[in-house]
Amino acid sequence: MEDYYYTPSGAISGSLDALSAEFSGYEPLPLRERHQGNVLYRARRFGRYYVLKGLVPELRDAPASREYLSKEYQIGVQLDHPNIVRVNSLEEDPKAGLCIVMHPNGKRFPVTLDTGQTVYARVLSHWHRTVALVSPSDAMTWNDIPNAPSGDMVIPADIRHRGLRYRVVGVDSCAFHNCNKLTHVTFPEGLERIGFRAFSGCIMIQDTITIPKSLRNIEPFAFADCNSITTLVWKSSPCHIGNILDTEWAFFYRCSSLKKAVVDECVDSLAENVFTDKNWLEEIVLPGFSLVRSLLTTR
């Protein structure tokens, strides 16, 4: 009988620390003065980074301190918001003791689109594999950023980051503010939010903007001063017009070239402040339902 010999691949024969169920590679993180009773570590498990929040050694066995940490976990695990760190579990760890296990807040990282443009994103949820596009710096503007995106930009439905695929579900506030070399933007189905001033000041965006069916929230001044847009195609039924206090269509503020709005036939309802008080609209194309028609009588 012939003998067979097997050689393990380098990926398997190397260190498996990064793929271990145990935390490794602990890095202490700084804490503010009011949290001096805690310790904070960055550590890896199964190749992914986590933040561990525990107690200083002298408090690890104190019943009151452990109870306080447990209550903090019970509150945190119920919260799920892009701007709040996600709480995963409460565990006993050899290094941190009793600790709350979290994902760190997503840092901005560059993404190269199929069109060759570089944009920036941050992870909203590792659990749900979602990201949002963000501004490239704390200045929240592209004015002073070299190689700003230009021409026609197609935002992808998903991107890859560290070998994993993430859905693009949002465009953060001021993400492309004053990115004034963009001439057209295409949004993917799956996009759920366009934030405050996300594209404001993009004065070269021309022709048609299409709001995808999947959009759930669009915030004030999202396209303010985009005064080359001529046509809006609206496909989202349940979209919430965020925090607009009056009837002005504030997310297209000062878009005086916008003359035509087309409501897709898939839309069965609209917020009442979408088509009111905008006398520069010359043509509104509606599907055959009465709710939207009734809104035009207030113009």
Image (cartoon, helix red, strand yellow):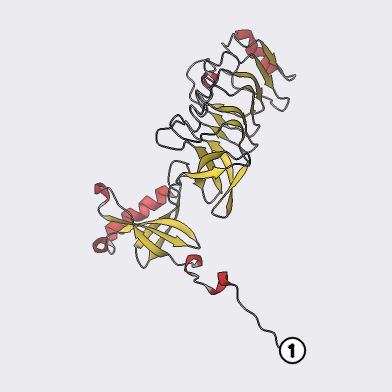
The x, y position of residue 180, in whole percent, is 52, 26
The x, y position of residue 255, in whole percent, is 56, 16
132 lies left or right of 98: right
The residue located at (57%, 23%) in the rendering is: 204
37 lies left or right of 78: left
> Label 1, on which residue?
2
The residue located at (25%, 47%) in the rendering is: 34
Q: Nearer the viewer, residue 240 or 109?
A: 109
Residue furthest front in the image? 146
The x, y position of residue 278, in whole percent, is 58, 11
Q: Nearer the viewer, residue 256 or 286?
A: 256
The residue located at (73%, 25%) in the rendering is: 265
Quadrant showing the N terminus: bottom right
Q: Nearer the viewer, residue 108 or 112?
A: 112
Kind of residue indicated by mark 1:
Glu
| Vertical relation: 72 (above or below) 255 | below
254 lies left or right of 71: right
Which quarter of the picture shows residue 293?
A: top right
